[in-house]
């Protein structure tokens, strides 16, 4: 599911223009904004609150790496890009890049299926769902032909979208040769026939990891430079990102 995203369920949310929000804003510290936001939306975990360059408008980051803009009372909200017209740049996009930065060296790679191609010098981690059509597109169209890379595949089934995906993930993980089974299933279209009975605690840890990283859709590609990119991007883009510093 290319950029499949869990909706931000905020009851009573009112989408306003920047002008309308600014007109109703008051000067208040970020701690008060967090308190107001949490009071109105107790089911949303606030990770941070920051002032923006726009007077009276605050940036709220909630769990799942979702950015919301609000006034001081958290009465008026909007979700979308905050643009600096003079700089011709999205402040929201810049913030998302910061939120999506991941230390590749801290990944628990022992919970991934490892594939070494060529000298394996470049590194790529992929969070993937066995029943995700875009994940299969990535495996069949984008990844073939990419050489001198080590690919770490984290099985990350999204049960709400694909109810049978967790069982398939367990079958793959429980197989004698995980890489061979994964490749045959995702790239060659062979059916899974093996058992799903084994120690699958690694999959639980991957699920927790994906939640921690804010991965809400598959495939999710994580590069050695810490950049997390959603979707079945083209081979040419993968090559560029693999070489990026």
Image: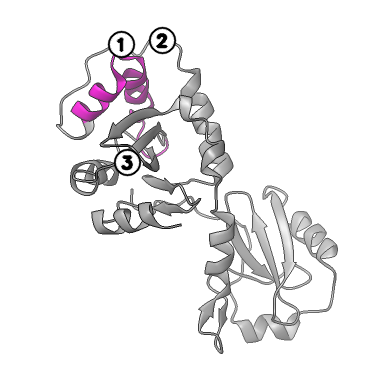
Measure the alpha-carbon separation of dots 1 and 3.
30 Å
Image position of 184 with respect to 37: above or below: above
Residue 172 sits inside the magenta stretch: yes
Q: Does the magenta stretch include residue 204?
A: no
Q: Which of 243 and 98 is in front in this view?
A: 243
Q: In which quarter of the image is residue 198?
A: top left
Residue on which the image places disc 1? 195
Residue 9 visible, this orientation: no
Instruction: In this rendered view, identify the residue nearer to me: 189 or 101.
Output: 101
Mark 1 residue crowding within 10 angstroms, few (<14) / some (14–19) / many (20+): some
Query: Could you say whether the residue bearing mark 3 is in a helix, strand or loop?
Result: strand
Which mark identifies residue 198?
A: 2
Could you classify mark 2 by the number of other residues whose Cα lies within 10 Å: few (under 14), some (14-19), or many (20 or more)?
few
The answer to whether residue 199 is above or below residue 162 is above
- The structure residue drawn at horizontal position 65% and vertical position 58%, both measured from the top left corner, is 61
Residue 117 or 223: which is nearer the viewer?
117
Above or below, 163 relative to 62: above
Instruction: Mark 1 and mark 2 in contact? Answer it, CB < 8 Å.
Output: yes
Residue plotted at (30% across, 37% down): 119
Q: What stretch is highlighted in magenta?
A: 160-185
Tell me how far mark 3 sits from mark 2, CA to CA.
Answer: 29 Å
Q: Mark 3 points at which residue?
A: 149
Task: Identify the mark nearer the N-term, 1 or 3.
Answer: 3
- Residue 145 in sight: yes
Label 1 SS: loop
Residue found 38% across the figure and 34% down from its top: 152
Q: Residue furthest front?
A: 119
């Amino acid at each position: 599911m290319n950029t499949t995203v869990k909706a931000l369920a905020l009851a009573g949310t009112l989408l306003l223009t920047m002008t309308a929000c600014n007109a109703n804003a008051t000067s208040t510290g970020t701690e008060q904004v967090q308190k107001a936001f949490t009071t109105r939306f107790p089911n949303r975990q606030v990770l941070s609150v920051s002032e923006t360059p726009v007077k009276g408008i605050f940036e709220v980051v909630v769990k799942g790496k979702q950015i919301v803009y609000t006034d001081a009372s958290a009465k008026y909200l909007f979700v979308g890009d905050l643009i600096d017209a003079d700089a011709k740049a999205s402040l929201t996009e810049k913030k998302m890049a910061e939120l999506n930065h991941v230390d590749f060296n801290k990944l628990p790679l022992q919970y991934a299926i490892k594939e070494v191609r060529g000298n394996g010098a470049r590194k790529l981690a992929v969070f993937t769902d066995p029943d995700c059509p875009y994940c299969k597109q990535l495996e069949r169209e984008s990844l073939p032909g990419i050489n001198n890379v080590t690919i770490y595949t984290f099985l990350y089934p999204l049960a709400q979208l694909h109810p049978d995906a967790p069982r398939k993930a367990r079958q793959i993980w429980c197989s004698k040769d995980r890489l061979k089974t994964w490749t045959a299933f995702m790239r060659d279209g062979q059916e899974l026939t093996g058992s799903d009975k084994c120690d699958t605690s690694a999959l639980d840890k991957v699920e927790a990891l994906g939640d921690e990283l804010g991965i809400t859709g598959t495939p999710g590609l994580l590069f050695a430079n810490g950049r997390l990119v959603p979707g079945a991007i083209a081979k040419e883009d993968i090559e560029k990102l693999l070489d990026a510093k």
